[in-house]
Amino acid sequence: DVCGDQVAIMAHGALRAIGTSIRLKARFGSGYRVGIMTDYADDVRHSISSRFPKAELEDESAGSLLWQFPRNEMGELAQMVEWLEGDSKSTKVRSWGLGQTTLEEVFLDITRKANPEGYHGYERKK
């Protein structure tokens, strides 16, 4: 994220976006992710699904749950953080972390939207 003052994203020879990494992530990012480590994945998944319906389970593996919150659901994200900061015995959460969409994910999303049919190798028209 600290690779430059301004970042430009091009696709098919056209400038698609330009700005600071924080501005690009805020404008084009998909929101925030909450990663949770637990020994009770089923219980935690059920608790979060019922308490925070806007949260979307993105990945689950070996007691690690990754939840996605849309940008426009900051209120529900704040409520989840309050819940996670509560008594760890009642939430059954060992540890958790919060992160924003990465610049790489923004780049991939913009380039995918520039070519909705997908990439099949070198795409130059003759």
Image (tube, rainbow, N blue to C red):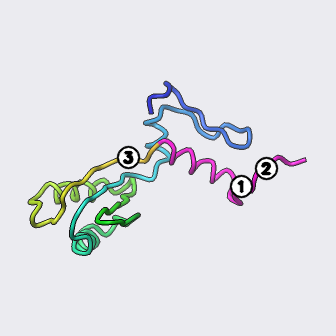
- Where residue 13 appears, x then y in whole percent? 74, 38
Query: Which labelled disc corresponds to residue 100?
Result: 3
* Other-residue count near label 1 (Cα within 10 Å), few / some / many at <14 / 14–19 / ≥20: few
Q: Nearer the viewer, residue 3 or 55?
A: 3
Q: Mark 2 points at which residue?
A: 123
Name the residue type under label 1.
Answer: Tyr
Question: For residue 52, what is the image quadrant?
Answer: bottom left
Which residue has dot 1 on it? 119
Disc 1/disc 3 C-alpha distance (Å):
27 Å
At numbered mark 1, what does the secondary structure look like: helix, strand or loop? Answer: loop
- Mark sitting earlier along the chain (1/3): 3
Secondary-structure class at tag 3:
strand
* Residue 5 percent across, percent down from the top left: 49, 24
Position of residue 69 measured from the top left corner of the image (x, y, whole percent): 36, 58
Mark nearer the N terminus (2 vs 3): 3
At a point 86% along the width and 48% down the height, the residue shown is 125
| Residue sitting at x 48%, y 31% | 20
- Region in magenta: 103-126
The mark lying in front, picked from 1 and 3, is 1
Q: Is residue 96 above or below residue 52?
A: above
Gap between marks 2 and 3 measured at Cα: 32 Å
